[in-house]
Amino acid sequence: MKNDLKLPVQDVNLEPFMATPPQYTRKKVLMKTDKVYKCKIINVIDLTEYEKLFHLKILDRVERKIFQFRPGQFVMLEVPGYGEVPISLSSSTNNHEYIELCIRKTGRTTNVLHEASVGAYVGLRGPFGNSFPMEKMQGNNVLLIAGGLGLAPLRGPLYWVSEYRDLYKDVHVLYGAKEPSQMLFTYQYNEWEKVNHINMLSIVENPDENWNGRVGMITELLDEIEIDPINTYAIVCGPPVMFKFVCNRLDKIGIPMNKMFVSLERRMHCGMGKCCRCMVGSTFTCVDGPVFDYWSVLNLKEAI
């Protein structure tokens, strides 16, 4: 029997995959999760016994200019041969010369980093996560509250409001630490107040013989400032246990929960939602966060 079936002529040049030329070099299609920026440590500042501030310079001049991030995001810092750790960005978004990372000595990789000196090479991936809605806060008062190491991720929003100071009304920074020796970035407090017109208040729980400042819990600082709850946004960074006390107090003052933002850097490990260590319910804090408004946090079981 004769087969009269005729197949249509196919022009491969009309297929969708031919619309663009093939990418034979994987470098051209690298995702930001794959891209590793080679960096050199150009400065190390001792802040406390356990925290150091590292200045990292991306070696490639073009990559240095194109690396961009927003306040609240983080990077994965790689120490060759020892692993990588998620670290919040502590520098200005407008600084393309070097990146600032405040690192606490807490484990194998960070212990090695604390032994590193100027000239050592490391790798960066990222930036990862979402950010604080700084544009939405324009024309309002901004309340920045940090506890302990929380001042490190809060430095991003601090740089932002300082560099665009005319776009914001009153800006307050409330900072609390357990002891005076654990306070970070003390050399910048006068600059924030005198140069950037930011009201800076600090407090410690356990004073030493040289401490002449306030003593108590960080929530007590809220009694010293005037807050217009309708026209105020709040950013809170620090240990999760602090969020309940601070945010509940802000709620009583009248600041809406969707105008309070916290940074949840809970057990983050890979930065891409693959290891599931930071999973809270069905939410990955590294992918869906680390920035959440407080209303969302209250609806995340075991988030804080």
Image (cartoon, rainbow, N blue to C red):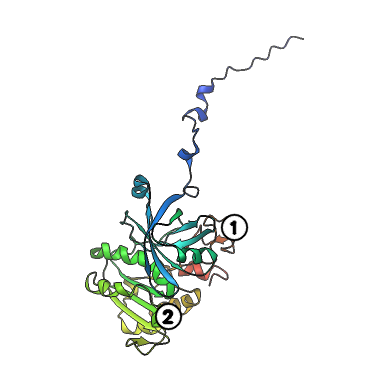
Q: Secondary structure at mark 2?
A: helix
Q: Which mark, by number, is residue 139?
A: none
Residue farthest along the bottom direction in this orientation: 209
Q: Residue at x 35, y 45 (%)?
A: 62
- Would you name the residue on which mark 2 appears? 249
Q: Nearer the viewer, mark 1 or mark 2?
A: 1
- Residue 162: quarter of image: bottom left
Query: How many marks are shown on the rendered structure?
Result: 2
Rendered view: 65 above or below 231: above
Picture coordinates of residue 82, whole percent (x, y): 54, 58
Q: Which mark, by number, is residue 275?
A: 1
Along the polypeptide, which appears first: circle 1 or circle 2?
2
Q: Secondary structure at mark 1?
A: loop
Rendered view: 228 above or below 107: below
Q: Residues within 10 Å of mark 1 (few under 14, many from 20)?
A: few
The residue lying toward the viewer, choosing from 209 and 153, is 209
Residue 237 at least partly seen: no
Q: Residues within 10 Å of mark 2 (few under 14, many from 20)?
A: some
Rendered view: 130 above or below 220: above
Amino acid type at mark 2: Arg
Picture coordinates of residue 116, whole percent (x, y): 44, 62
Label 2 near label 1: C-beta < 8 Å? no
Amino acid type at mark 1: Cys
The residue lying toward the viewer, choosing from 162 and 183, is 183
- Residue 102: quarter of image: bottom left
Residue farthest along the top direction in this orientation: 2
Picture coordinates of residue 88, whole percent (x, y): 43, 63
Q: CA distance from mark 1 to mark 2?
A: 35 Å
Q: Residue at x 33, y 57 (%)?
A: 93
